């Protein structure tokens, strides 16, 4: 542990594993929510009670995504899987700016691509400045679009007078 005037750094084996802002208040806790996400990914049952996440003011779309992930995966009796996927989305903020992750979450909601993989793909596409190419075969839970063949007689009915 290295204590500085404004922060505390935790080092293990010569590698920095955590850096937190320092508080001089008595019995004060300073939490960095991102620091606890790897543990919460393993213990998703603690997601709602996790003190480090209390007061983390995320945009509304994140809670919408969480609700949809849990609803989609609870149909298969895997509510924990929905929470785990939500934590995986939050973990994207370990590597990418929150603005990029937020924009990807909004895109995923707009497209109906409700999965951590889809959000990850959308973030990478946004960062790399390329169009997102979501392969529908990788998302079997998405509704399949059925587009029928057009018959010429359908057009003839439009041109005939009533």
Image: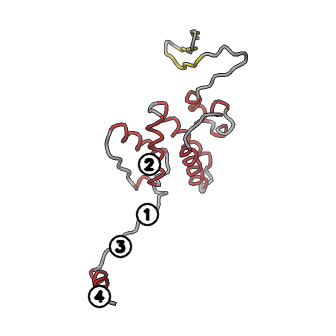
Mark 4 or mark 1, earlier in chain: 1
Image quarter in which the C terminus is found: bottom left
Q: Residue at x 53, y 19 (%)?
A: 17
Label 1's element? loop
Residue position for label 2? 107
- Does 27 appear above or below 157? above
Q: CA distance from mark 4 to mark 2?
A: 42 Å
Q: CA distance from mark 4 to mark 1?
A: 33 Å
Q: Which mark is residue 144?
A: 1
Q: Position of residue 6 (x, y in %)?
A: 57, 13
> In front of the other: label 2 or label 3?
2
Q: CA distance from mark 2 to mark 3?
A: 27 Å
> Mark 2–mark 3 contact, CB under 8 Å?
no
Q: Position of residue 3 (x, y in %)?
A: 59, 9
Determine crowd level at label 1: few under 14, some 14-19, many 20+ residues with C-alpha closer than 10 A: few
Q: Residue at x 43, y 63 (%)?
A: 144
């Amino acid at each position: 542990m290295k204590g500085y005037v404004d922060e505390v750094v935790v080092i293990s084996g010569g590698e920095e594993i955590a850096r937190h802002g320092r508080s001089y208040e008595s019995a004060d806790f300073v939490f960095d929510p991102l620091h606890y996400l790897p543990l919460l990914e393993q213990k998703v049952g603690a997601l709602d009670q996790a003190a480090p996440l209390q007061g983390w003011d995320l945009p509304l779309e994140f809670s919408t995504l969480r609700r949809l992930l849990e609803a989609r995966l609870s149909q298969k009796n895997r509510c924990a899987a929905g929470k785990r996927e939500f934590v995986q989305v939050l973990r994207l903020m370990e590597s990418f700016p929150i603005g990029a992750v937020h924009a990807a979450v909004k895109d995923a909601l707009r497209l109906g691509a409700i999965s951590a993989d889809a959000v990850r793909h959308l973030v990478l596409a946004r960062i790399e400045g390329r169009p997102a190419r979501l392969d529908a075969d990788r998302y079997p839970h998405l509704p399949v679009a059925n587009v029928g063949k057009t018959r010429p007689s359908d057009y003839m009915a439009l041109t005939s007078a009533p």
